Amino acid sequence: MSNLGCQELCIIGDLNARHQSWFDHTSNRAGNLLSSYLYSKDLFVTNLHQSPTFLCLDGSRVIDLSISTRSFANAISNQYVDDTTELFTGAPARGHLPVITEIYLENPVITNNNQRRYNWKNVDWNRYCSAIDMTIESKLTHLLLSNSPTQLWGWLNNIVHKLNKEHVPVKNVSHHSKPYWNADLSLLSNEVREARQRFKYRSNEYNKNRLDNAKDAFSEALKAAQTKFIEQQSLAINSAKPDNFWHNFKNTFYKNHKNPMGNLKDEQGNFLIDDKDKANALYRSMFLGQHLDTASLDKEWHDKILQHPPSNPKPSHISSFSSPKLSTQITKEELVCAINSTDHTKTNSDPDGFHPKLIKLSKPFFHMLLLHIFNLVMKTGEWPWKTGTVTFLPKPGKDATSVNAYRPITLTSYIGKLLERILESRIKNHIETNNLLPTFQHGFRKNFSTDTYLFHLLSYVEHHKKSRHKVAALFLDFQKAFDSIWLEGMLYRLEEIGIPSALLKVFRGFLCNRTIKLKVNDFCSEDKPHVIGLPQGSVLSPIFFSIFIRDMIDPKPNLKPLQYADDATILFFANDSQALSTQINSAATAVQQWLLRWRLKLYCSKMQVCHAIEF
């Protein structure tokens, strides 16, 4: 080790050394020599399993070893042989089985990429939630004296991580881990595997029939298990939510496509093969605002906004609809309502290790601590949940090699989303009470939907059809809408609708100085600054976007705007084509000026004009 310049050492590999001390049923010369050498150097074979690592027709062997120093041996927290990896892949008659070794460093997190995962389905939820609640109760008096929401959140996060290890079982995950799988299927699949190995060793008629019979028996048992599972699931179908059943059905019985990201092209058109390079290219494209032409933006307006921080007195044009109730303390009723609206059917935990069912079944002292943390956030403006993991979903019909063919989704804390949901409810109530959003915005609002959007569109056209007017429609689509929102401008727009300064401070904490990790296939990047745009996947982002674009289109007698989120349509009505053309040009100019002022951009290639419809 001194020659290598290291103090600790771990060697893992096929050493062809057999010895009874590491659970082989015999010892060979290489094993005896290795055992003596390791003893003289104070090294250890740290095989924590007793399973064979090499299979062949004349027996099994333990020849894949992990050798380490004493300190490193203590860091190996778990080790097992994955003997299911080749279950359905036509395993050879002889070969090595993978040995999975888990090394404990600091705060190890079990993620969805590992072979061993938290088995949330088999958690004793009452015992688990009670353990968390009892731990909080024992420290509650001290915790309630803290004035730092970030410090309290860190403590709670550490406690949940610790109790996850104690109360959440861990499962080995292989490609056949399905809810209908049972012990009989495992037994029959092993018989298929054994029959296949015998047939490969001696391909005679007897072994061929034996293999066919084993396959038939396994196939019948598999169909029976799947049928039973479907029947059980059918009994639990909620007629109000049939989509949930079919979503689970497809995930269970159809191949699970994880949409792996292939090669991408960078800005120069060069292909990117390494996942780290892909993540960097996606970051540059989506989170730095490179698609915006900053030279053509309204710099004078930009400087004006920056010189007016929300803490300053309001300009005279700002709305007088300010409501101090928006920034009052969070109540227990609001917290319970937010918890009850949490979707606890999700199968995985968030990046912080919190499962939605923990939140749904949480106990009184857990509620008290959350309420204290939330009210400290309201008091200090300090937002503890500033990190997120960004995954990318492919857009259908797009060139898969383009960075623009993917939609970023930010996975954030379930606890942070509880507070977001409470604040969203307050803002929506404030907006609807004071009519602060235009009636033609049909996105993310109660009693509005794509149906109401289309109904109004068709109604307007039908009405003017009967009036024998000429009709034109201008269809607009933002380029990277949520990813382009100017954060200082967003805070200014919130102040315009009367958000009080105390709540603006909270929203500044929510929007600014965020960090993200980009996940591409099995690669996860380091923390990167999120300097522009709203986090997609956040509860607050949709209503924030509607507020940001609320005055983009100014309705006029012969101009009817319609919006659904970031999709906008402007309908024009006139007696002749010349007047219609004038209206379109005037509206397009006004929209372009608004875009330059608020630093957004439209997809010119997606803009469509359907004009001069003859009736």
Image (spheres, helix red, strand yellow):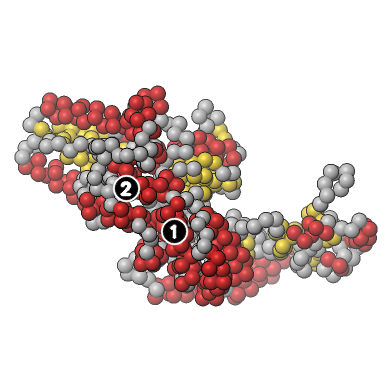
Q: Position of residue 281 (x, y in %)?
A: 53, 36
Q: Position of residue 66 (x, y in %)?
A: 79, 58
User: In the rendered image, which residue does mark 1 sit on?
Assistant: 374
* Nearer to me, 216 or 234: 234
Q: Secondary structure at mark 2?
A: loop
* Nearer to me, 532 or 505: 505
Furthest toward the top, the residue is 295
In the rendered structure, the answer to whether residue 352 lies left or right of residue 172 reads: left
Type of the residue with mark 1:
Phe
Residue 583 is tagged as none
In the rendered structure, the answer to whether residue 401 lies left or right of residue 574 reads: right
- Residue in the picture at 37% in, 71% down: 237
Q: Position of residue 486 (x, y in %)?
A: 39, 37
How busy is the neighbourhood of tag 2: few (under 14 within 10 Å), some, or many (20 plus)? many
Q: Position of residue 534 (x, y in %)?
A: 41, 44
Type of the residue with mark 2:
Ile
* Nearer to me, 276 or 272: 276
Residue 499 is tagged as 2
In the rendered structure, the answer to whether residue 421 lies left or right of residue 349 reads: left
